[in-house]
Amino acid sequence: MTSKERDSSLKKNQHNMNQQNNNRINITTNPIQSSAGYLNMAQSITNGTNNILNNQSPTLNVNDNNILKVLMDAYR
């Protein structure tokens, strides 16, 4: 193995190790982000329900895509 090949191999190994570390970090932080998203979604649904119950917005305009937006934001 030439020194050039060895250097290339070392770089690849380092890159793979970095990727594995990044994956570990993502696994630990994603549940926290997901929880925050679900909390926001629950709060939005609660607010929307309260508005309807209080007749503040008696008709729900589905064309506004508010519900879809809330769900998509929570999913992200």
Image (cartoon, rainbow, N blue to C red):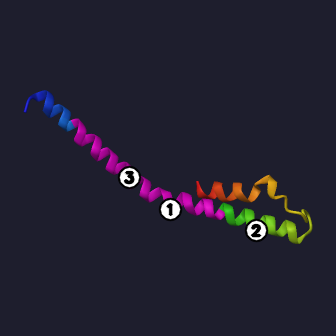
Q: Residues within 10 Å of mark 3 (few under 14, many from 20)?
A: few
Going 25% across and 41% down the picture, which residue do you hit?
14
**First along the sequence among labels 1 and 2:** 1
Q: Are marks 1 and 3 in contact (CB under 8 Å)?
A: no
| Quarter residue 1 falls in | top left
> Disc 2 and disc 3: Cα gap in Å?
35 Å
The three-letter amino acid code for the residue at tag 1 is: Pro
Q: Is residue 26 magenta?
A: yes
User: Is most of the magenta stretch helix, strand or loop?
Assistant: helix
Residue 21 lies left or right of residue 35; in this view the side is left
Q: Position of residue 46 (x, y in %)?
A: 76, 68
The disc at residue 46 is 2
SS assignment at label 2: helix
Residue at left offset 14%, top offset 31%:
5
Q: Quadrant of residue 45?
A: bottom right
Categorize mark 2 by other alpha carbons within 10 Å: few (<14), some (14-19), many (20+).
few
Q: Which residues are magenta?
A: 11-39
Q: Which mark is residue 23?
A: 3
The amino acid type found where label 3 is placed reads Asn
x%, y% of residue 23?
38, 52
